[in-house]
Image (cartoon, grey):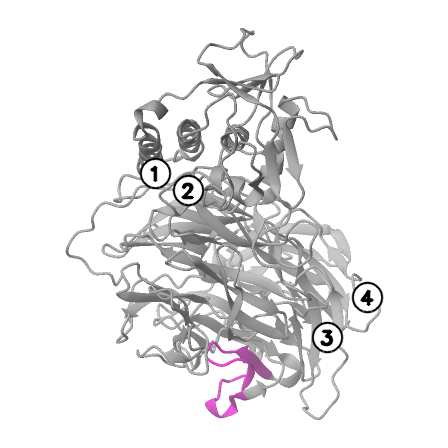
Amino acid sequence: MNGHVCGIVVQTAYLRVFMLPPAAQFPPARLRIGQCTVDVSSREIHAPGARRPLRVTPKAMAVLLVLVDSGDRVVSRDALLAAVWPDTLPSDDVLTQAVTQLRKAFQEVRGDSRYIETIAKGGYRLLAEVEDLGGAGMQPHAPGSEAQITDAAPSPPVLPADSSSPVRVSPAFPGEAPAPPRTVARGRWHFAVIAILILVTAIAGYWWLQQRQRPAAVDSTTPGSGRIATFLITSAPGFELAPTLSPGGGLVAYMAVPEGQRNIAIMLQSTAPVAPRQLTFPEGMAEDAMPRWSPDGRDIAFLRVTPGRDCRLMVVRATGRAERIAGTCDPDAQPGYAWTPDSRGLILDRGERPGLQILDLASGTTRAVEYDADSDHRDTAPRYSPDGRWIVFLRNQPSGDFWRIPASGGQAERLTRMGAEIRGWDWMPDGQELVYARRTEGGSRMYRFQLATGTHTDLGVEDSEQPSLAGNVPALAYVIRHPRFGIYRFSTGGDSAAAGGGERLFASSGRDRVPSIAPDGRQLVFVSDRAGPLGLWWGEVDEPASLRLLEGIRPDSRQPASWSSDSGRVLVVGTAEPVRAGQEDGSPATLGVYEVDPARNRVRRLPLPQSVTAPEQALYVPGPKGPDQRLLVLADAGDGRLQLSLFDDVGRPDSAIATLDDVVRVQVDASQNRLLFARRSDPGLWQAGLDLDPASVQRFSPGGAPAPWHDAWTAAGDGGTYLVRRTPDCSALLTHHSADATAVSAADQCLDPVRRAATRAFTFDPRTRRIYLTLAEYDGGDIGFATFDAPEPAPASGSATH
């Protein structure tokens, strides 16, 4: 792939240099501009009286040559940007920096422009006379002794932008007479010089990319496999997320907070570590997110969301113009979407009916994709295959798998059996493989999945997610996440629930998650990587020195641990052995249900029936013989859905005495002797009796309910519930919903106006009326970039259903 890219750049430069007329093939190598001598090939400018020449960047020299070629005419900023930074959509700052470098090299004094004149709202003009000095060498100087002016970042041509031409020079201005003759003939040789500079820069950029992106290791057991080295193209403070690559792989758009602003916007830059350009400008409390580049390279779709109020599907030209509204969406259940192959519509995963829908951009109408969609399944994150024949999507996140249907509709076919939380995916441009990110023990990792063989290959990048591939070349952009979470305690009485009034518990630089407070109100267990690997930690909330790691178990971090009624034991889903990043077949490490005695630091695995696979949550439930007699387990039902199973004996769970389908999280509400649970197929909260009697199942909170698989809710101990959500004015808003629809609920409390609450479960202590939840201390993310070889042709035979 890299060799192919370099070949394109070299070939284009070759044509521009060697297919010029004979007189233009050998341009002068040295110029005299004013009183300064310019060596074009070495990019050195020697000013009179200077001890040594100054070397400028290739881009600065290219700007100078365009000005030389334009005679006495003013060259607009747009024309210079188009000529020197072709098809990269740079900001004005790069041109300003290049001109500043030239003025420094020419030893201009501020306010006395003898060489380069700035025309207000116009551009630049070269003032000094130019003379051709031929190819004689510069005055000798000691190697390495020159003062150098360097770019703020390496040269950008890592990949060609979405154009076959590496340089564009502005045409003559209409209606203007030719410039009067000057000492040096102005003509096509300047194009050749610029082409040579582009060629040299491309070769240097190619070598630099090869050195930076050389794979750390190669797995030769799988065709086309191989690990990639971490290489970042953004590193600004804060986060850069949700990258999307242009079809040619030369540009990347992503979401970030621009410097000095507060709203999330869509940013645009080349696939090199250079300064980005702001593409969208949301106003008020709106934020722009989840950009998607169209297959034809002309447009970028994105979501404009005002949290809790409004959501719109937007489309903007890749140039930043012609922004328009394409449709509306739910701000609390934002859609996953992708472009149709003809760039005329979007395929969405949320609508008024189950399944996938297609939005026609011209008419604004939607139509359902005709396939065996089912309200018991949740199909998300759809993508068309590069050839337009298939639609692949995720079914039943956050324990999902890949499924596919023909683009025209039909029967859904299961492709994987992972039961994993997928954190972004995309097609390889040849349509033979997928690249996806999956939640692992402490973060997430990326994998390649070959459809024909069912082979999964680890790409070897820690904390990587949200992969995006270019449509025409195997170029990959992704996110390296490095968030930090802390556990905070808030009072629901109002004294410490004011903005910023929470108390940080067991502070560290690690990621603390899913806290669970014991019924006695003193003990807290949570999951954290503060010691390196993900572990289960225990401590007394008012005794920081009591904190310690509970050894012998690696917990799963999706659901909180469940305490026994006497606060002596906890049930945890996890594994007793160190969890590998993933099995070679793509399946996560085998999980089980463990009973932990924190006081004695004892751990035992419960002997679950073989029918219970991939458990996600386990709880103690009261029974006829005692408060913690029975066991409730939420696990994979075998078809991608989760099933709740009730067992009569915690110590010896045999066959289930009752089951309940379509559950994504459950909690025992001891104050009301009931279960509260959320479903994937229907937003809101539901309730059921402790014995899972089907007649007891009913909707609990039709209003103000969480979105599907949103875990930020808990029983309030008074028959109601607490929810945590994000609004324009508060990043962590605590809302109380009474069990009685006619009753007045407690006033909303802003727990923190800036830091976001994790969407994972939080916990409530009814004795002290205190909330324990996770807040984001720092939510960082940088964009990584890589290219890799296309896979070898897949075998003709083989099933894609693995």
**Closer mark to the observer between disc 2 and disc 4:** 2
Mark 2 highlights which residue? 786
Q: Name the foreground residue: 579 vs 632.
A: 579
Q: Which residues are magenta?
A: 674-698
Tell me if residue 72 can be seen: yes
Q: Farthest residue to the left: give it.
A: 796
> How far is disc 2 from disc 1 in space, using C-alphas?
13 Å
State yes or no: residue 680 in magenta. Answer: yes
* Marks 4/1: CA–CA distance: 59 Å
Q: Which mark is residue 766?
A: 3
* Amino acid on which disc 1 is placed: Val
Q: Is residue 274 left or right of residue 25?
A: right
Q: On the rendered image, what quadrant is the C terminus found in? A: bottom left
Q: Nearer the viewer, residue 112 or 339?
A: 112
**Label 2 vs label 4: CA separation?**
47 Å
The residue at 50%/50% (across/down) is 479
